[in-house]
Image (cartoon, rainbow, N blue to C red):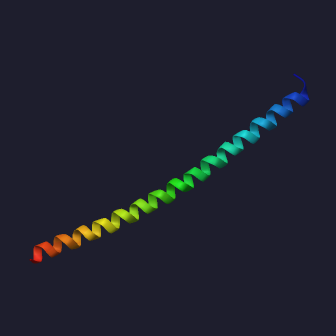
């Protein structure tokens, strides 16, 4: 393997690795957004259940 082949392989490997890293970062952002939405849903459901329980106790 000569220097040009080595350099080409190195650059290709680095480009692929950086693309993989970028993909992972984008997926992480999607997961964080989904977790936020789930947390908001849980808070909403919890509030509704608490209100229902209080209404049932009042009757």
Picture quarter with the N terminus: top right
Residue at the bottom extreme of this rendering = 58
> How far across and how far down the image is residue 3, in percent?
90, 28
- In this image, 5 relative to 55: left or right? right
* Quadrant of residue 45 within the rendered picture: bottom left
In this rendering, the answer to whether 7 lies above or below 53 is above
All told, the count of numbered labels is 0
Residue at the left extreme of this rendering = 59
Q: Residue at x 28, y 70 (%)?
A: 47
- In this image, 16 relative to 43: left or right? right
Picture quarter with the C terminus: bottom left
> How far across and how far down the image is residue 17, in percent?
70, 40
* Quadrant of residue 11 within the rendered picture: top right
> How far across and how far down the image is residue 42, in percent?
34, 62
Residue at the top extreme of this rendering = 1
- In this image, 38 relative to 6: left or right? left
Q: Residue at x 13, y 72 (%)?
A: 56
Q: Residue at x 11, y 77 (%)?
A: 58
> How far across and how far down the image is residue 40, in percent?
40, 65
In this rendering, the answer to whether 21 lies above or below 58 is above
In this rendering, the answer to whether 13 lies above or below 41 is above
């Amino acid at each position: 393997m000569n220097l040009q082949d080595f350099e080409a392989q190195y650059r290709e490997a680095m480009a692929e690795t950086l693309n993989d890293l970028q993909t992972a970062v984008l997926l992480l952002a999607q997961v964080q957004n989904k977790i936020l939405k789930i947390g908001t849903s849980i808070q909403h459901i919890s509030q509704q259940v608490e209100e229902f329980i209080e209404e049932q106790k009042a009757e």
